[in-house]
Image (spheres, grey):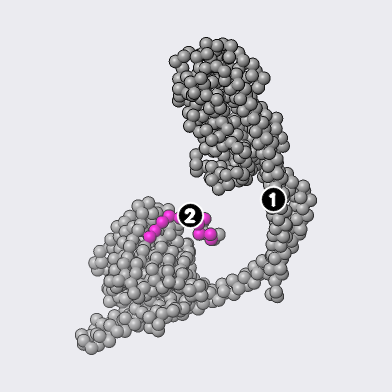
């Protein structure tokens, strides 16, 4: 395949996404800066209006207090009390002309009110010494007048007010000053704020320098004083005259853009603010028209690029799929050819091993020479190694004769761990974690243990400096395996190690037969091949996860058994002696036939031989006096050993049958398990035990 256009199309598709996004982001940012600047202009303009209005109100109050001083200047305190009604009336006339004032009050220096516009008479024992506007006026003479926080009225009934109070410029007849105070209406400010705030602005306020609100819209339910840690108070500390800031209101918990300015000559500030969400909405409103024009064009260009990319990728997938299918076919053909070759070689090799093993049995029984016995043992070990290699090759080719049954994993894994313990050095620990609810699996118990041993040996060799192996089991569904060829329920048996791990290249070849990274004479490369073949032949699969330096996890997935299994091992039938009788022996290999015939005769049987299945069936039909049929499975001709066994069983249901095999690609599909399977190569002792158990079962 030539150079793919996919990278270019991907880059173009990315550009179609990124370029409009960058442009739109820049336009949004620029619009936001413009809207924010407009909002700041509106805030500053409103602050100017609020400041001017506050100054006018304070000037009006100042003139009113001066007029009150003029009224009471000729009178001493006693005269004021005597003329309280008349003076109150004159003060009421002043208040009536000023909507921003609730009342005017004169208090002597001891804190007793002399007269108020709110009432024609005041009890002589009324005490105002604890009122803030009285204490502030007496204590602070530097300001034109003291501005109190919001307070509830005591001399009249009405809403809360804040007071502007000061000491009189001229003392009374006794030489002591008096306190004159004006109760200012917050509602007057609220009304003005409501008329003044236009457009997007949503807050206006009058605040003392200590954070106490005197007037505010939106209105608050109760008087509010900001703590020193608030954004506004911290801004005052940094910029005591004027400032703009983004702030989360501690009055109503709303994010706002806020501006403030000090009222010249007074310890109060005017505020104006706009909600941050309003600025954001104005930005959105300004950007929506851009989307009307830009989005369809962008989407159209994206669609064209996407369609082109899909078309190219579809074409490449089809090409890649064709190449993968061809590669998979070649690999399948290679493995199938290897399996066929393995089967043929294994069949012949097992027959050779059978001849060698049978004759070694005869030699062992007929000699007492120690040297000869040692050599016989060496040859028997060689036969055992050859048998193991053949078995692993057959497992990889999925042609190993299996005897699956239900396996209870808790007991089986613990017994397997006991088998593993002597193989592990003291620096390697083995943990088993099998929960109570793990299902039984269906598999060949022997091959299952061999598979675990193969995995454990690899794990051990991967931890030369020690480490930890963990054997676990858990229930899974086929959907977790992501293998369309598998369905139903499975049990995952995992063996993990903390060893050296595998590189991606080694991991990709882990199941190849004869592939190994171990030194010469340290491994055959067939261990994981046996595990792979066993898992596939058992109706499951196997997966390996590994990273260099972090260890490896090999997981066998075996199908759940539909029938229950017990933890206990099945007790083998007692050996005893075979009962003897007439045997029909079918074996095409003359040397193997001679060995098996000799073994049967040594065990007390009379033997009739046949060279193939058809000849054996003909002998059986002519003479039905046989007690036992022993037959190889793979024989020349149209009839194999399984076909022979079925025909004999149909004619004589009581006939005992033993099928011997070292290889069969039809055993799993053809055996009804109504007879005994004996794996080649077998010894005289193996044959004797099978005959004894078969006789006991009968």
Reading the image, the residue beneath label 1 is 33
Residue shown at 54% from the left, 12% from the top:
84
Query: Which label sits in the foreground, 1 or 2?
Result: 1
Q: Circles 1 and 2: CB distance less than 8 Å?
A: no
Residue shown at 24% from the left, 68% from the top:
577
Q: Is residue 658 above or below residue 36?
A: below
The one nearer the camera, 616 or 283, is 283
- The CA distance from mark 1 to mark 2 is 57 Å
Instruction: From the top left corner, tell me how far across and down residue 355 is, in percent.
Output: 36, 81
Q: Estimate how packed mark 2 is, as few (under 14), some (14 to 19) or many (20 or more) residues with alpha carbons within 10 Å.
A: some
Residue shown at 47% from the left, 76% from the top:
513
- Mark 1 or 2, nearer chain start: 1
Reading the image, the residue beneath label 2 is 477
| Residue 642 at least partly seen | no
Q: Estimate how packed mark 1 is, as few (under 14), some (14 to 19) or many (20 or more) residues with alpha carbons within 10 Å.
A: some
Instruction: Please state, as top left, top right, bottom left or bottom right, where the C terminus lies in the image.
Output: bottom left
628 left or right, relative to 184: left
The one nearer the camera, 613 or 666, is 666
Residue shown at 71% from the left, 62% from the top:
15
353 left or right, relative to 89: left
Q: In which quarter of the image is residue 347?
A: bottom left
Q: Is mark 2 on a helix, strand or loop?
A: strand
């Amino acid at each position: 395949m030539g150079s793919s256009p996919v990278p270019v199309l991907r880059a173009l598709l990315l550009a179609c996404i990124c370029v409009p996004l960058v442009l739109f982001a820049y336009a949004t940012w620029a619009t936001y800066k413009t809207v924010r600047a407009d909002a700041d202009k509106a805030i500053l303009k409103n602050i100017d209006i609020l400041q001017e209005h506050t100054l006018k109100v304070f000037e009006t109050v100042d003139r009113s207090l001066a007029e009150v001083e003029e009224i009471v200047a000729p009178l001493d305190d006693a005269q004021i009390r005597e003329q309280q009604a008349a003076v109150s009336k004159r003060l009421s006339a002043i208040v009536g002309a000023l909507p921003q004032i609730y009342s005017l009050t004169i208090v002597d220096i001891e804190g007793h009110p002399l007269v108020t516009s709110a009432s024609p008479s005041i009890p002589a024992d009324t005490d105002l010494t604890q009122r803030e506007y009285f204490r502030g006026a007496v204590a602070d003479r530097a300001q034109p007048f003291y501005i109190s926080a919001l307070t509830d009225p005591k001399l009249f009934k009405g809403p809360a007010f804040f007071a502007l109070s000061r000491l009189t410029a001229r003392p009374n007849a006794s030489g002591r000053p008096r306190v004159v105070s004006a109760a200012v209406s917050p509602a007057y400010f609220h009304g003005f704020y409501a008329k003044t705030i236009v457009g997007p602005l949503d807050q206006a306020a009058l605040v003392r320098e200590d954070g106490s609100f005197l007037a505010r819209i939106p209105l608050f339910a109760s008087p509010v004083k900001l703590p020193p840690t608030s954004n506004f108070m911290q801004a005052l500390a940094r910029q005591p005259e004027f400032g703009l800031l983004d702030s989360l209101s501690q009055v109503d918990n709303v994010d706002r853009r806020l501006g403030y300015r000090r009222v010249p000559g007074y310890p109060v500030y005017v505020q104006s603010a706009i909600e941050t969400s309003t600025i954001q909405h104005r930005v959105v409103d300004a950007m929506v028209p851009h989307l009307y024009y830009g989005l369809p064009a962008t989407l159209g260009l994206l669609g064209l690029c996407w369609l082109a990319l899909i078309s190219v990728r579809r074409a490449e997938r089809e090409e890649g799929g064709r190449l993968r299918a061809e590669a998979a076919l070649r690999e399948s053909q290679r493995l199938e050819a290897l399996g066929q070759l393995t089967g043929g070689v294994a069949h012949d090799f097992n027959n050779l091993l059978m001849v060698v093993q049978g004759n070694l049995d005869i030699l062992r029984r007929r000699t007492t020479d120690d040297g000869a016995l040692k050599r016989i043992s060496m040859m028997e070990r060689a036969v055992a190694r050859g048998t193991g290699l053949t078995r692993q090759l057959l497992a990889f080719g999925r042609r190993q004769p299996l005897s699956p049954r239900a396996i209870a994993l808790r007991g089986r894994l613990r017994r397997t761990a006991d088998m593993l313990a002597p193989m592990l050095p003291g620096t390697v620990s083995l943990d088993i974690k099998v929960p109570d609810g793990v299902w039984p699996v269906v598999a060949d118990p022997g091959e299952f243990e061999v598979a675990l041993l193969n995995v454990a040996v690899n794990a051990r060799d991967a931890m030369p400096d020690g480490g930890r192996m963990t054997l676990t089991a858990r229930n899974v569904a086929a959907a977790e395996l992501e293998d369309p060829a598998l369905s139903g329920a499975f049990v995952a048996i995992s063996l993990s190690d903390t060893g050296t791990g595998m590189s991606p290249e080694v991991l990709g070849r882990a199941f190849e037969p004869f592939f190994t990274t171990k030194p010469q004479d340290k491994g055959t490369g067939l261990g994981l091949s046996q595990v792979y073949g066993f898992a596939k032949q058992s109706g499951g699969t196997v997966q390996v996860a590994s990273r260099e330096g972090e260890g490896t996890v090999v997981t066998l997935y075996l199908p759940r058994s539909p029938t229950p299994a017990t933890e206990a091992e099945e007790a083998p039938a007692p050996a005893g002696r075979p009962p003897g009788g007439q045997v029909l022996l079918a074996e095409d290999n003359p040397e193997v036939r001679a060995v098996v015939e000799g073994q049967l005769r040594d065990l007390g049987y009379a033997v009739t031989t046949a060279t193939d299945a058809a000849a054996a069936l003909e002998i059986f039909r002519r003479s039905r006096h046989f007690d036992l049929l022993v037959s190889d499975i793979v024989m020349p001709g149209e009839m194999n050993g399984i076909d022979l066994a079925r025909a004999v069983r149909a004619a004589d249901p009581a006939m005992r049958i033993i099928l011997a095999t070292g290889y069969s690609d039809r055993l799993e599909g053809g055996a009804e398990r109504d007879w005994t399977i004996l794996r080649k190569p077998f010894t005289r002792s193996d044959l004797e035990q099978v005959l004894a158990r078969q006789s006991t079962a009968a």
